[in-house]
Image: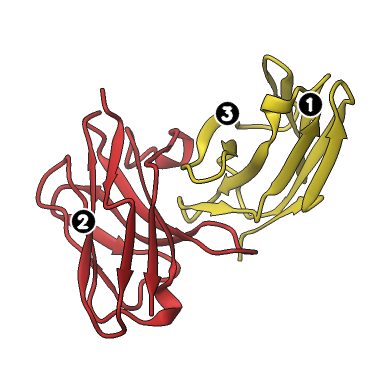
Amino acid sequence: EDQVTQSPEALRLQEGESSSLNCSYTVSGLRGLFWYRQDPGKGPEFLFTLYSAGEEKEKERLKATLTKKESFLHITAPKPEDSATYLCAVVAGSEKLVFGKGTKLTVNP
Amino acid sequence: NAGVTQTPKFQVLKTGQSMTLQCAQDMNHEYMSWYRQDPGMGLRLIHYSVGAGITDQGEVPNGYNVSRSTTEDFPLRLLSAAPSQTSVYFCASSYGAGVFGTDTQYFGPGTRLTVL
């Protein structure tokens, strides 16, 4: 059974304090790993797709990386507007998205 | 483009009532799906459709029905609402069906459902 575990469950940072969120996965035949951002009361918003180990993608202060067992979402010099819940999801042989429970990030000014 | 739209935004039902959650997309996407999101749990797939006239079950299909008569619309029906169906429901769509594994899914704003 495909499984996705995100850590930590919650993370509180000061503005400018860089950190990383982790997404570890157990799947057979990874086809893609997705990162989403979800603001309170809204639907998930797509951030990145990673397909193979060693791949990296960047968008503003966010950088996603992928290994054979996990993905990291690095946040550099975060701002309060980066506060959100970050969701990780994988697609493997079942061709269905399997989501982790998310990491709630709070960035204090 | 409006993207993925969902109605209603909020709904309160009594146990045993039935209702339909509406979902529409204007991006000509083949793949559409319904998820529920509960506190402390990840998004879970209820039903999905790879094209008009084709639907299949996801991880938690019991108590829900779907149909896909057009490319644009994918309604979710609750047959006899139960308190365990209290949740936030999200509809999503993506361009690819057969290549779903590599296509980005776009989510609607959600419907918050409470069953008393």
Protein chain holding label 3: A
Res. A15 image quadrant: top right
Q: Nearer the viewer, residue B28 or A15?
A: A15
**Quadrant housing residue A83:** top right
Residue that numbered label 3 is attached to: A47
Is residue A67 in view from this perspective?
A: no
The kind of residue on which mark 1 rests is: Ile
* Residue count near mark 2 (Cα–Cα under 10 Å), binned few <14, some 14–19, many ≥20: many
Residue positioned most to the top: A60
| Residue drawn at (75%, 27%) of the image | A54
Secondary structure, mark 3, is strand
Q: Earlier in the sequence, mark 1 or mark 3?
A: 3
Q: Is residue B99 left or right of residue B73?
A: right
> Which type of secondary structure does the marked residue at label 2 adopt?
loop
Q: Are marks 2 and 3 in contact (CB under 8 Å)?
A: no
Query: Which amino acid, by three-letter code, is at mark 2?
Result: Pro
Mark 3 crowd level (few <14, some 14–19, many ≥20, 10 Å Cα): some
Residue identified by numbered label 2: B75
Q: Position of residue A100 (x, y in %)?
A: 64, 54
Residue designated by label 1: A75
Mark 3 residue type: Leu
Q: Name the tint of chain B in the rendering.
A: red
Give residue B84's position: percent from left, percent from top: 45, 79
Marks 1 and 3, Cα distance to the nearest angstrom?
Answer: 13 Å
Residue visible at 26% across and 34% down in the picture: B29
- The chain ID associated with circle 2 is B
